[in-house]
Amino acid sequence: MGDEVAKTPVSMEEKLAQLRAQYALKIEQRVDALQALVQNLDGAEDGERSNILTQLRDETHKLAGSGATFGFPDVTLSAREMEQACVQALVNNAGANDVSGASEIASILAGLCEKLRRATEEQEKEQVEAIAVHQRPEIPDLHDSFRQKVLFIMEYDGPTAMQVLLEMDHFGFDARIVDHPSKLMDDLQTNGDVNVIVTGLTFDGDDNIALNVLNDLRKDNLYNEIPVIVHTSLESMKTRLGAVRVGVKAYLIKPVDMADLVDVLDHVTMRHEDEPFRVLVVDDDESLASHTELVLQGSGMETRMTTDPMDIFEVLDDFSPELILLDLYMPGCEGQDIAAVIRQREEYAGIPIVFLSGEADKNKQLSAMEMGGDDFLTKPIQASHLISSVRIRAGRFRELRSFMVRDSMTGLFNHTTTKQLLDNEIARVQRSGADLALVSLDIDHFKNVNDTYGHGVGDRVIKSLARLLRQRLRSADVVGRMGGEEFAAILPESGLEQAVHVCDQIRQAFSEIVFHTDGAKFNVTISCGVAAFKDHNTATMLSDAADKALYAAKHGGRNQVVKAD
């Protein structure tokens, strides 16, 4: 124990500095290797000379793409110049007696070495500063964060306050009751984590106490960033105007259906934050790929890297990226060929593929894009440019994909997409041996809800369940609407008992939600069937087992969770 030393977290700037230092150590070795190749040009036969020039062209191309990225702009300029000289010598087919091409290359290489020796050791600041500008706050896991939204509710009727407190807990909010506006100031000062204020309205003569308190808070700049919602039985233009003037975001008339209130809370607290974009980096140069990863991770993105393009499908199946950054020239294959192969798989046909290469020839860039690419970024590239380009393209892909893969009413995955994602998860756990559980769930007696209260109310019930599933399950879990009142949830890294426990919590919470309509109020329950991959090891077997368990739950009395046999 005495020998253990606490490790200090390494900052992004330190990681970038480490990569640059490693690159600086290796770059002299690479230049030495280039120098040796140039020396071998003297006295080489025509065919051998062509091979040497080709090696020099390829190596200087990589050096040109990486130099400025790691803070050596002079290296990039000199390497680019040398690459062009090699290309010209190959085009001219320099013969055995033609030493001019070799001499020119040797001269350029000498200049490169000299510039490298003069290259400053001071770290370039542009990349770090650009990353900091684009950096996003860390997005917490939804399973851990759904209780972090804190509500202050000003409610004067004790029983009503307790009912609101209970139902807000079911929807994943941490509600705290304030029984008089005069206490709000003190409570805000002692609780710095408040996300939203929900208040009723009360009067002292002609003065609205709650609005006066909110106005004072606004003047003191103590709650300008905290959205306020009014729920009240008062419906008049005067009170609505007063509420707007003190910054109230929404005005709800009692009795307030909790589902409607949560809709508003979701909107004003921006609960549905975007998950980080997932980007796959494919580059045979490990140091350059690591640098690209670090830049994107520093801006809040999730990345995966592979230096072997032959592993591309395994990584795609496991990671499901929203954008692929692909090097153009790699040993054994070219990026445009990899892009064409990826496009042959239907499930990956729409993923944006962006080539990230030192190739500056526009004709070659267009030729590569014709094989399946969507854009071409030229190395070296500024960190800010890379981050913005990736974010724009991945964002568009996510937006367009949502129309195709999401259910329009609930925002959950649709039936087809859920089935595809289950296939992907099955393939992943077959390789890794990890746990996986599938849940089939259904709203009990849903036809009665529609027949009794109308389809509009039925839609509210469906949306409430969808919201509860999103809040109570993890961000890694897949939740889909399979049709009508039927849903499914794919729970990676979850065994049977753990999945049953989570589902039972959701079942209990949903059964306690009170729905209001036309003076009536009612509750709804759900039934769940749960199956584990270790007992049913194909997608079809797993789905059938979960469905049969759901059938048993429905015929066993409903409002329960049943494990598959």
Image (cartoon, rainbow, N blue to C red):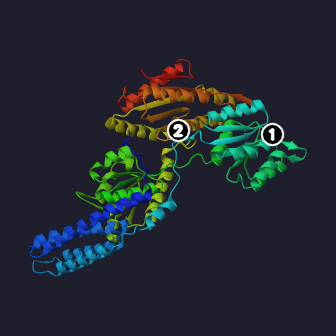
First-in-chain label (1 vs 2) = 2
245 shown above or below 539: below
Q: Position of residue 287 (x, y in %)?
A: 32, 59
Q: Residues within 10 Å of mark 2 (few under 14, many from 20)?
A: some
In what quadrant of the picture does the N terminus appear? top left
Q: Which mark is residue 114?
A: none
On the image, numbered disc 1 is attached to which residue?
233
Q: Residue at x 64, y 47 (%)?
A: 267
The residue that disc 2 covers is 143
Asked if residue 50 is positioned above or below residue 17 in the image, the reply reads below
Measured in 3D between alpha carbons, the distance from the residue under mark 1 to the one under mark 2, in whole angstroms, is 35 Å
Depicted 217 relative to depicted 144: above or below: below
Disc 2 marks a residue whose amino acid type is His
The mark total stands at: 2
Whole-percent x, y for residue 236 in the image? 83, 46
In the foreground, 556 or 17: 17
